[in-house]
Image (cartoon, rainbow, N blue to C red):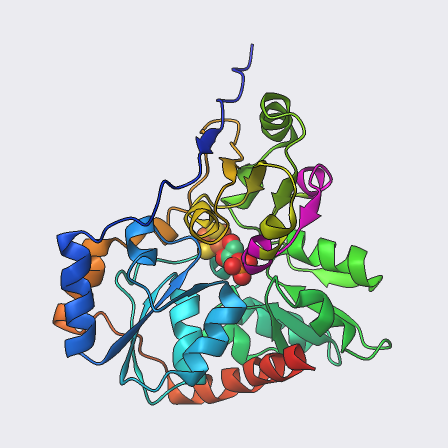
Amino acid sequence: MPLAPPNPTVFPPLAGPTPLSDLQREVLALKKAKDAVILAHNYQCEDIQGVADFVGDSLGLAYKAAEVSASTIVFCGVHFMAETAKIVNPAKRVLLPDLEAGCSLADSCPAERLAKAKAENPGMAVVAYINCSAAVKALSDVICTSGNASRIVGRIPADREILFVPDQNLGQWVAERTGRKLRLWPGSCYAHVQFTPTALLRAKALHPGAPVVAHPECTEAVRALADEVCSTELMVAWARRQQADTLIVTTESGMIHRLRREVPGKTFVAAPTDRCACNECRYMKLNTLRKLRDCLANEGPEIALDEEIRAKAEIPLRRMLEWSKT
Ligand code: 13P
Ligand code: SF4
């Protein structure tokens, strides 16, 4: 008989601000000495979020990276996010605490395969989710994030065929919302597809009446059980709007650190998978506070990009930043 999914992890409201640790103080002193800005994704661990200058989703981080004036950006997230920072702000040194911090979505779409698909389908517009390599961005017409995907797809002329890469779940959600027929690349986020209806229903049964938010990288069956589907940034605004005291969050559990800080007084339940009580992205969690300290101290590892690819990738990225505003 299959085992019942574990009980979800429950995060009660924070009692107050968390005092800085010695290591966090050391990171802040190094950051100042090295003229660095720390940008962190919502999925980073709590102690990294606590020293970051900005914590946000992929879209917010791309805008922030473009406007950094300090000489160094330390990007606490995964490789494609740090690459994005380098694409939009090439004069800066961009550091990533662990260069192995990849992404299953980015891995699912090698540039050579996309180039082949484009050659076989001339005239097709390529909309690439930002979770892809610089080389894939360089082959794309426009980039999108989970925060603006429907808006971006809506800007492509109705008579143009669209290939949406690399997340089939996000693509399917965008197709539902926009009514556009999209050709979907068969990629997925290994972490988000681990959420199942069974595990989510169990969390709902344990917390009756708690509204559920889910990331669009979740499968259709899981999204169908959610009251709201949105990017990590929009989850903060959604949580603020809720009357209920307890909310179920169906995404990488690092998100809950941001929610607890910015939406006080609520209890957050990390949606479980069939096997674990919350869900962590193994790539995001490769960055640690210690690696962040070492990265600042050693001024590396650094993101290196071929200039030709960077310049080509900047065009669809800038297009996204522009289309997102209007
Ligand atoms: P957001 O842009 O919503 O933060 O998502 C990024 C991501 O990698 C989700 O898995
Ligand atoms: Fe990639 Fe999924 Fe990790 Fe986001 S959570 S970085 S999509 S593997």
The picture quadrant where one finds residue 98 is bottom left
Instruction: Tell me the residue at 85%/61% (across/down).
Output: 179
Q: Which residues are magenta?
A: 220-236
Q: Is residue 53 above or below residue 65?
A: above
Image vertical order of residue 206 relative to residue 108, above or below = above
Q: Is residue 104 above or below residue 80?
A: above
Q: Residue at x 13, y 70 (%)?
A: 298
Residue 255 screen position, x and y as percent: 46, 49
- Nearest to the observer: residue 159 or residue 31: 31
Vertical order, 129 against 236 (above or below) = below
Q: Residue at x 66, y 75 (%)?
A: 118
Spot the residue most to the top. 1
- Residue 221 in percent (x, y) is at 71, 38
- Considering the image in quadrants, where does the C terminus appear? bottom right
- Work out whether residue 141 can be spotted: no
Is residue 226 in the magenta section? yes
| Image position of 231 (left or right of 24) | right
Q: Residue 260 or 149: which is nearer the viewer?
A: 260
Of residue 70 and residue 92, the one placed in the foreground of this image is 70
The residue located at (62%, 45%) in the rendering is 214
